[in-house]
Amino acid sequence: MRESSSDGCVRFPCSSYRFPLMRDVISSLTAGLCSGGGADVIMQARRGCRTCERCPLGGCAVLGVAIWTLTEKHHYVSLLTTTTYASVAYILLLAGIVVIFAALLACCAILKEDRCSLLVYTFLLLLVFLLEAVGGVLAYVYEEQVMAELSHTLTQTFNENYMMEPEVTRAVDMMQREYHCCGALTFSQWRDSRWLQEGQGINNTVPDSCCKTPSPYCGVSDHPSNIWYNGCIHQFEEELGSHLVVLGAVGCGISLVQVFGMILSCCLYIKLKDVDDEY
């Protein structure tokens, strides 16, 4: 919409490209066209509007970490006593989806100068901030909890649930092959397992996944030339701990970005209101 003032200048109180650069563009549009700088202002605003395309990057980072956790590490969830690890990933996954949607909504709000959409965007950022903060804090808190109880729970899971629960069996075999280990603390713990005591191992002394070169019934011999002697727990602790630190850093770190987004969107909302009231 254009309006002509008494001095004959054409003004654009509702230009489509007015607000991406906020203060500079807002203050320049009503006067820039009359001073011969209108083209520069519009070009500057267009460049600012293109920054909307980069808005979802934070959401993509959170989304990527969450998806990586759920696809690459979900096998080991069955070895843990709580669902907190998976919950952190799902929380960050939800936050990533919401922030991408919010960024697209912000672009539409800016281009259309829709204060209602901008307000919805601000509330979505608040929701994302809470989700990411909760996910980050849970990751850090759970890291301490895992380190304290993993030694006991992993040993119990290996001894009691191997070959009794399919998910646990797959997770244990995958862990032993991936980490080149055998048993929770040591290979000799398999002697106390239900799997061996109930005769399910047939002639095996350890699972075939303990073998340096896995093959059917290779676990008959527990000679060091045939199987891995080191336990899995220390490597699992290190990897799980470092991954929880990454989840916590991503959640807490990117949640701070949402605070700046909320502040800027509030400022923009106020500017829009002031300009609308003026015209």
Image: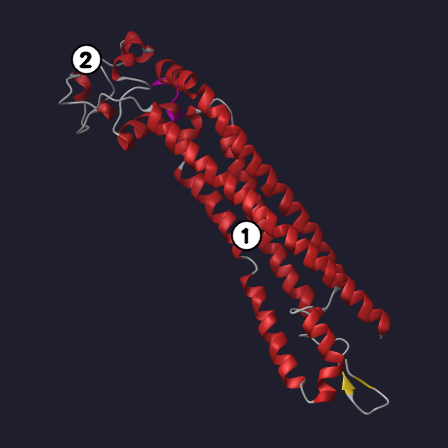
Q: Which residue is mark 1?
A: 59
- Percent of width and height locating residue 279: 85, 75
Which residue is nearer to you in this view: 154 or 142? 142
Q: CA distance from mark 2 to mark 1?
A: 52 Å
Q: Is residue 234 magenta?
A: no
Q: How is the image coloured?
A: secondary structure
Q: Which mark is residue 13?
A: none
- Which residue is depicted at the point 15% across and 23% down? 226
Q: Which residue is mark 2?
A: 203
Q: Quadrant of residue 34?
A: bottom right
Type of amino acid at the residue the image marks with label 1: Gly
- Percent of width and height locating residue 106: 65, 61
Q: Are marks 2 and 1 in contact (CB under 8 Å)?
A: no
Residue lying farthest to the bottom in this orientation: 8
- Percent of width and height locating residue 166: 37, 24
The tag earlier along the polypeptide, 2 or 1, is 1
Q: Quadrant of residue 240?
A: top left
Label 1 sits on a secondary structure element that is: helix
Q: Relative to 135, is 154 above or below? A: above
Which residue is nearer to you in this view: 269 or 249? 249
In this view, the mark in front (2 or 1): 1
Type of amino acid at the residue the image marks with label 2: Asn
Q: Residues within 10 Å of mark 1 (few under 14, many from 20)?
A: many
Label 2 sits on a secondary structure element that is: loop
- Percent of width and height locating residue 234: 34, 25
Q: Relative to 238, is 47 above or below? A: below
Q: Residues within 10 Å of mark 2 (few under 14, many from 20)?
A: few
Which residue range is magenta in the image? 162-167
- Which residue is depicted at the point 43% across and 37% down? 243
- Which residue is depicted at the point 60% across and 37% down? 134
